[in-house]
Image (cartoon, rainbow, N blue to C red):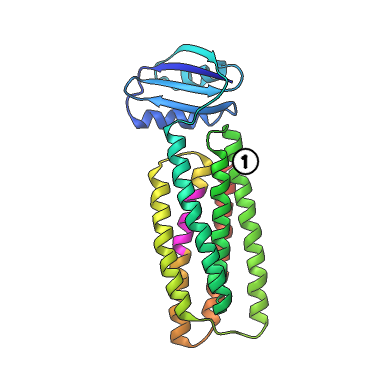
Amino acid sequence: MRQTNFKISKMDCPSEENIIRMKMQELDSIIGLDFDLSERTLAVTHKGDYQLINESLDSLSLGSKLINSIKIDSYEANEEDKKQRKVLLIVLAINFAFFIIEMSIGIISQSMGLVADSLDMLADSFVYGLSLFAIGTVVARKKKVAMISGFFQILLAVMGFAEVIRRFVGIEQMPDFKAMIGISTLALVANSICLVLLQRTQSKDSHMQASIIFSSNDVIINAGVIIAGLLVWILGSGMPDLIIGTIVFFIVIRGAIRILKLAK
C-alpha cells in the first residue's frame, strides 16, 4: 500500500474535488482520497503503481503535479470516512429499531403495510451495515456492496409479494388502522431525519448513494401506509392495506434496480 501526493494547481473549490472523485472511481486500486483545498493538494492511498493515477489526473487538465509516493503500512480513515461512519451508525440504529417495532405491531395489528415497511427497514439496515463495511475500501468493493444490497432488496420484495398474494386469496383480515397511522407517522419522522443526515454527507460513493435511495423510498412508503390506514378507517375494508403492501414491494424493487445500475 502506498500514499502518493499530488499538487493540483487548479483545484480551488468543491466542484474540482468532485470531478477528481468521479475520475478516481474508475480505478480499482484506490483505497482513500484526502483533499486539502486550501493547499491544493491530494493524497491518494492506493495499491500498486501510481502511474495510472497520475495519468488520470493529467487527463482532467487541472494542473496536477506529482510530489512524492511513499510506502505505508496502514491507512487511517480521513474526515469524510469518519463522517460517513458516524451517520451510517445512527441511521442503522434507527432503522433496525423500527424494523423490530413495525414487524411486531404489524403482526399484532394484521397490517400488511406495516409488515412490508418493516421488511424494507430490515433491508435498509442490511445496506447500512454493508456500507459501514465498505468505508475506506477500494471503489470496486464499494460497488460490490451496492450490488449485494440491491439483490437482497429484491429477495425481500419477492418474499413480501408471496405474503400479499396469500392474503388476497385467503380470508381478508381487518388491520388496526390506528396502529398503521401512528407507527407510520413515527417512522416517517425517523426516516426523514435519516435522509437529511445521509444527504448532508454529500458523498458520491456508490454505497452511500444506495443508502440515500433506500431512505428516499422509506419516506414515500411511510406516507403511503398512513394514507392506507386512513382508507381502511373510511372504507371499513382491509383491501387498502393489501394494496399499499403491494405498492411498497414495487417501490422496493424499483429502488433495487436503481442501486444495481449504480453499482455497474
Start and end of the magenta stretch?
211-220
Q: Amino acid at mark 1?
A: Lys
Where residue 90 appears, x then y in whole percent? 45, 50
Query: Which residue corresponds to the image point at 53% horizontal and 31% vertical from the top-left?
Result: 25
Depth check: give the residue in front, 238 or 197. Answer: 197
Q: Which residue is mark 1?
A: 144
Residue 247 shows in the view? no
Residue 243 shows in the view? yes
Is residue 217 inside the magenta stretch? yes
Image quadrant holding the C terminus, namely top right
Rendered image quadrant of residue 2: top right
Where residue 154 appears, x then y in whole percent? 63, 57
Query: Which residue corresponds to the image point at 41% horizontal and 26% vertical from the top-left?
Result: 35
Query: Which residue corresponds to the image point at 43% horizontal and 86% vertical from the top-left?
Result: 234
Q: Residue furthest bottom?
A: 236
Is residue 12 inside the magenta stretch? no
Rendered image quadrant of residue 15: top left
Where residue 263 appears, x then y in whole percent? 58, 42
Image quadrant holding the N terminus, namely top right
